[in-house]
Image: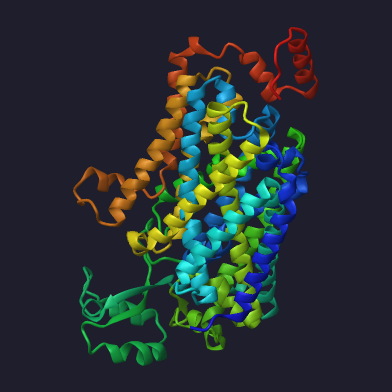
Amino acid sequence: MNPNIGALGLTVILIVATVIISLAARLANTTATDFYLAGRRVNYFINASAICGDYFSAASFLGVAGAVYASGLDGVWFGAGFGAAFVPVLIFFASPIRRFGEYTIPDFLAARFQSPAARVLGVLAVQAVCIFYLVPQMVGAGATWQVLVGTGFLGMDAYTTGVVLTVTIMGFYVTAGGMRGTTWNQMVEFWILAAAMIALAALTFVYGFSYASALENVSKGPLTAPAAYQVRDLTSPGPDGRTPAELARSVMNREYWEAKIQPKLTDPEATVVVLIPQTSKITGQPMVFTEPGHRYSWLDQFSMVLALVLGTSGLPHIMNRYYTNPTGKVARWTTVAVLGMVGVFYIAASIVGLAGRAMIPELAGQITDHNLLRQVVSGVLVNSDSVMPFLAQALGGDLGLGVIAAGAFAAMFSTIGGLLLASAASWGHDLYDQFIAQDAPEWKKVAVGKAAVLLMSGVALAVGLGVPASGLMSAYPSLIALMVTWAFSVAGGFFVPVLLTSIWWKQITLTGALAGMIVGGGGSVLFIICNILRATRAVSPDSLVYWIGQLAFPAAITFPLAVAIIFVISYLDRRNLPSNIDEIWIRIHGTARERQQRRLERLSKTDPVRS
């Protein structure tokens, strides 16, 4: 298969740019603080851009528009959840986290509770979150290369090429550039992907798209989705007496049915892809674009949004970036800038999703890319995540598709870079520096951090290549968006309850904190494993695991349960508060003058000061 030259060319330019930036930054990584935190000298605009680059993964860039295209209002909730997630960060976390003055979330927990156990559990939680988040990024890298470039190299298929290339580039640029190079790269990558999203939204309006008219038109009939059937099943009556073929013919284009489907109906073993009208999981009635309930029940919908809104505050690759700001005030302004950027981005993504649903039936005849053309069934995309590439190719030709390809890889590169660095910081700083070699020279600390990046790059490669063989891609049609939400659920379970209470409640104890992390994070992982076993049919429908696994997103249960456990156990253990709780509180909430006064008092007593 010949590669798409526009997509391949702009992706190569992006890769070369990231390599150059990383090489330019490598000489600045002389200390551990430089490597992990860019010397704590990143201003609010650069850091806000880098946070957005870190945050906008493939699930945001391709997935939100795809979710709106496939699910209507359900998909809009993804964008709303992602976008609103920085409100809790702004209100509760950004400034106190930075004022406390550590390197990582495990560092914060260890200092807050004066406990190595809190650090170790925090490191394990960081690795769990990073792995959960790396899996969809690697799947996205392979799938995006497969769709947008369409060819493999060095004897590898297209999917494997995308995974291997992404891991290689990311391992290099994080190892060479550290946090400074990663910050610069993430800033550049954010503005590339943001410009691509906004340009595509604007291009739809240039070609006559009207938001209000499109929303009215696509909501007139039932929402449809592609489904694959063997002919014998397609023509067999269902519980209501109607065959899937009858349902499909009621919503499909007559000419398409007669040309593509009718000739295959004589072979009972043939497989055909048809459109099926969807039923709301909430009302049981035909699904409408402007109503919720396409994919999830009301509990899963609420739990999904809760996971997205709260989970961001526990993502280590996002929260670690606040330690790169020079002060708590700058961290707060960074979050304000992020809120503005994410708002514009997700509005544009929702516009693109609706535009795809309204315009693709008319644009299908203009597509020349065969990878994209064969995904259309009677005017509807088989893979909703292809809505942006499809619109870009139809409206902007190969150049338009190339811009979207560059934006998609920019999204994945920036997120994977942040994850590798966050994981490396927990291994290198939180374990090596604190337990193995506290007095190691700076060059050795940096070397350990780089080795940890390479180690996690190997893990990313393994999971990216292993997922297709696991059966998950067939069990979950929207695997990338789903797994990103799982990562938010795990982060929200492990870290958000304990961070929230640690920052705003003096009475939390070490025992309560550890119990809350185990219940919240461990419970989230347990629910997700049960859901996977259910979806892959690895357990009996009569089993407890199958029943537990019906909840796709566990945040609505695990988050309040973790908070309750923290309060109850801390109350029962209230005599074991940290002895220096007043000093800790000044570090978290005190003014600059109060913190300076406390430092002078400690210096006068010749006590060591930890900055």
Residue 402 placement, left or right of 127: right
Residue at 24%, 81% (x, y): give it. Answer: 231
Residue at 40%, 82% (x, y): give it. Answer: 252
x, y percent for residue 518: 41, 31
x, y percent for residue 390: 55, 77
27, above or below 493, in the image: below
Residue at 20%, 46% (x, y): give it. Answer: 543
Residue 107 placement, left or right of 599: left
For this orientation, the residue located farthest to the right is: 593
Residue 284 placement, left or right of 480: left
The figure's colour scheme reads rainbow
Which sits in the foreground, 318 or 560? Answer: 318
173, above or below 582, in the image: below
Residue 289 appearing in the image: no
x, y percent for residue 376: 46, 80
Which sits in the foreground, 113 or 194? Answer: 113
Which sits in the foreground, 489 or 435? Answer: 435
Q: For the image shown, how many numbered marks are present on the structure?
A: 0
x, y percent for residue 575: 49, 9
Residue 382 appearing in the image: yes
Q: Quadrant of the C terminus?
A: top right
363, above or below 458, in the image: below
* Rendering quarter of residue 62: bottom right
